[in-house]
Structure formats: structure tokens, C-alpha cells
Image: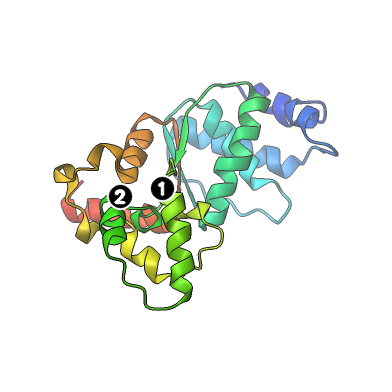
């Protein structure tokens, strides 16, 4: 990818200016984007510190997408992870007019385990009265969701005993022996990641995966 492509995208009359109202060229943003482009072409390590309002997200996403390489982007929080997946990347797909696949991955406890879910529904044990409402929410959602991601349940509190009893956990996973293996949300997430050009994760999952790979010598 020639550097002129980045100038055409970030310039005052470029692709971003056409799509974003009140857009203005930020030299620091373009400089950062060039550095990211260079490190993707040459390999190595790049550390960048940029102030608020520089436009860091677009500065690294654009050269990453244009590189046409399979890449992992790790964020500090799940909220930022979802912002990239649901807002920034769809915007760039339209802006750059490029077709590429993207998926986002979270820790397994963020996903519904179908086996635990249906077993729990047979004989639910509720510790508090409010858990009755949470169970109804999860029950209705769990029989219809396509992703199994608890982020779709806005009303569910972070500490929810019912969710704890139906979410995916490694110690409860029986892998391919499970009758729900083909429909498993963790299985689908991993399949999507294998096919994706761009994978969005958070730091917790990224470093947990590195730790496992290190223990396994991978």
C-alpha cells in the first residue's frame, strides 16, 4: 500500500472528509497511521502515545485493514471492543469500499452454554426473588439468540447468580461429546475467528490466550 493512499484517505478532501461532518486533517493522526503502516510492512514493535482527540482508532485501523493481512486488535475494555465491531469497522467498510471479514471474541463466561442452560431450566434454583425476573429474561433470550453474548441482555446486572449457572465455563465443557457442540456459541466464535481477516479481542482474553499457549509451548 503506497503512502499516497493514506494521504488520500486522511486529507482535507479525502474519503474521511466525505463521510464525517466537520472533519479536519490532523497531522498527528496521519503521522501515526504512516508509522503503523511501516511496522505492518516491515514487522517489529511500535509504541505510540497520542493525546485525546488525535483519532487513534482510525489511525491504526485504516492501515491495518488496507494491509490485507490477518490481524488481531486487542482493546482495554469490552465496551471499546464493541465500539470497534459495531460502529467503527462498519463505518470503515463503507468508507474504504472494501470487503473483509471481522469477528470479535470475549472470554467464554460472556457466552451462554446451551447444555447448562437447558439443564438448569429443568430444575432452577433461585437464591433471590429478583432472580425470577432474570431467569425469565435469560429464558426468552436464550431460546432466540444467535450469538449467545450476554451483552445483548442490557437489564442483566454484572453479578447475576442465574447467569453464573448457565454461562459457558471451561470446567463444565465436555467438548465434542456435548450434544450441543455444533450449535455451541464458543464453537461458532472460534470458527468465525478462523475465517476472519480481523479479530477484535480485549486484553484479558488476549493475555489469557498467550498464557495458555506459553504453558503448552505453542
Q: Which residue is mark 1?
A: 148
Number of the label disc, if any, that sits on residue 114? 2
Of residues 11 and 137, the one nearer the viewer is 137
Asked if 209 appears above or below 32 in the picture, the reply is: below
Of residues 98 and 158, the one nearer the viewer is 158
Residue 161 horizontal/vertical position (percent): 38, 71
Question: Does the image show residue 212?
Answer: yes
Residue positioned 48% across, 58% down in the render: 137
Label 1 close to label 2 by CB (< 8 Å):
yes
Q: Residue furthest front?
A: 122
Question: Does the image show residue 159?
Answer: no
Residue positioned 34% across, 38% down in the render: 188
Residue positioned 19% across, 43% down in the render: 179
- Position of 52 with respect to 181 (left or right) is right
Residue 109 horizontal/vertical position (percent): 36, 58
Query: How far separated are the C-alphas under marks 1 and 2?
Result: 9 Å
Which comes before the other along the chain, label 1 or label 2?
2
The quarter of the image holding the N terminus is: top right
Residue 139 horizontal/vertical position (percent): 41, 55
- Position of 196 with respect to 118 (left or right) is right
Residue 162 horizontal/vertical position (percent): 38, 67
Residue positioned 16% across, 42% down in the render: 176
Q: Residues within 10 Å of mark 1 (few under 14, many from 20)?
A: many
Amino acid at each position: 500500500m503506497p503512502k499516497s493512499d493514506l494521504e488520500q484517505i486522511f486529507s482535507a478532501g479525502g474519503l474521511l472528509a466525505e463521510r464525517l461532518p466537520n472533519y479536519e486533517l490532523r497531522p498527528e493522526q496521519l503521522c501515526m497511521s504512516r508509522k503503523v503502516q511501516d511496522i505492518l510492512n516491515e514487522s517489529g514493535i511500535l509504541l505510540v502515545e497520542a493525546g485525546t482527540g488525535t483519532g487513534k482508532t482510525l489511525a491504526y485501523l485504516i492501515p491495518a485493514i488496507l494491509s490485507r493481512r490477518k490481524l488481531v486488535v486487542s482493546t482495554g475494555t469490552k465496551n471499546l471492543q464493541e465500539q470497534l465491531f459495531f460502529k467503527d469497522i462498519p463505518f470503515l467498510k463503507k468508507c474504504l469500499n472494501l470487503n473483509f471479514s471481522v469477528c470479535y471474541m470475549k472470554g467464554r463466561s460472556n457466552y451462554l452454554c446451551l447444555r447448562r442452560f437447558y439443564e438448569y431450566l429443568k430444575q432452577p434454583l433461585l437464591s433471590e426473588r429478583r432472580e425470577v425476573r432474570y431467569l425469565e429474561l435469560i429464558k426468552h433470550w436464550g431460546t432466540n439468540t444467535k450469538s449467545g453474548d450476554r451483552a445483548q441482555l442490557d437489564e442483566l446486572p454484572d453479578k447475576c447468580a442465574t447467569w453464573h449457572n448457565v454461562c459457558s465455563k471451561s470446567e463444565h465443557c465436555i467438548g465434542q461429546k456435548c450434544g450441543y457442540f455444533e450449535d455451541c456459541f464458543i464453537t461458532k466464535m472460534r470458527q468465525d475467528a478462523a475465517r476472519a481477516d480481523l479479530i477484535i479481542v480485549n486484553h484479558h482474553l488476549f493475555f489469557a490466550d498467550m498464557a495458555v499457549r506459553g504453558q503448552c509451548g505453542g
